Amino acid sequence: MNVIDEATETVLTQRYGPVLLLTLNRPKRLNAWTDEMEDRYFSCLSTAESDPDVRAIVVTGAGRGFCAGAEMADLTKVELSLGELPTGRAIARSHPLYMRKPMIAAINGAAAGLGLVEALYCDVRFAVPDAKLTTAFTRRGLIAEYGAAWLLERIVGYSTALDLLLSGRVITGGEALEIGLVNRLSDPETLVADAIGYAQDLAAHCSPTAMAVVKQQVRDAAGGDFQAAASDADKAAREALGRVDIKEGVASYLEKRSPHFPALGAAGDLEAVAPRADGR
C-alpha cells in the first residue's frame, strides 16, 4: 500500500496493487462537493485512466459520509439566472460514467444529491446498512440534475426512480439493496476492504479490454433495442477473437492458473462513443 497524498488534499489516493482507492476528503463537511474537489477528483480519474497499472478504482468518503452533495455555502453564491447558468455541466460532470476501467463505490454514510449521483456513475455500489441516500433535488427546488433521471430509471426502474426523485426521501442502505440501487451491503469495519477485494478480483481475473468493451456495450444498450445490441455484440465478438486476451483466457482456464491479461490500451484502441469530459 502506498499513500501518495497528504491529508490536506480534497481527494486522497492510495494504491492497493492494481486497485486505486480514491477518498473524498472533506470529512467535517460530510465531503460536500466543491469545484476544488471536482477538479482534483477528475484529475485523479484521468491519471488512473491512462495508467496501465491501474485496473480498477474504488471511491469512498472520509469520516461519516460518502458525499453530502454540493456545498451549500457555494450554492448560495449562485445567481439563479438562466443566462448565467453554465451550459454542458451535466455532460462535463458525467466524466466518471465514461471511465473505461471498473469503478466501485463504497458508500460509507450520507450520499445526497450530487453525492448520490457520483455513486450512481460508478459501475458497482457497496454500502453500509445504515447509509442514508437521497436524491434531495426537489427538496431544494431543483430538478433531477446531472443525468440522475436517466441513471435511476435504468438502475431501479421507472416507478421507483420517480418515487426517489419526486419525494427526495431518505432511504437506508438496506432499502437501497432491496430496490437494486446498491449491489451489496458490508459492515462499516469491512466496507472499503470488501470493495477493494472485489476490485482486486476483477483486476486479477478479468480482461481489462473486455471489461472496457462490456461497459461500452451496456451504455449503448440503454438507448437502443435488442436487435441493435445483438448486432453490436456480434461485431465486438469478432474483434475480440483477434485479440490475445481470448487466447490467454482459454489457456489459463485449461492450465488451471490465473490469467495474465495485457493492460488496457490507449483510448483510441477501442471505438470511442463517450462524449468528452468537457462536453465538446
Image (cartoon, rainbow, N blue to C red):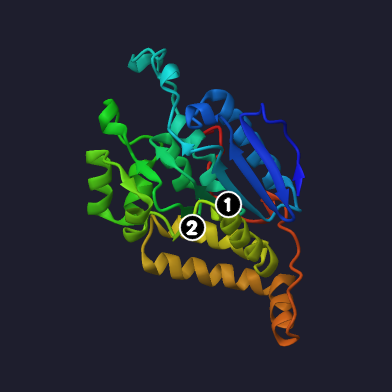
Percent across and percent down for residue 161 are 28, 49
Q: Which residue is mark 2?
A: 186
Residue type at mark 2?
Ser
Residue visible at 47% across and 45% down in the picture: 119
* Quarter of the figure with residue 78: top left
User: Does label 1 or label 2 sit earlier along the sequence?
Assistant: 2
**261 relative to 33 in the view: left or right:** right
Q: Is residue 25 above or below residue 248?
A: above
Residue type at mark 1?
Val
**201 relative to 218 in the view: left or right:** right
Q: CA distance from mark 1 to mark 2?
A: 9 Å
Give the camera-side residue of 28 and 121: 28
Percent across and percent down for residue 171 are 31, 47
Residue visible at 37% across and 12% down in the picture: 79
Q: Are marks 1 and 2 in contact (CB under 8 Å)?
A: no
* Quarter of the figure with residue 226: bottom left
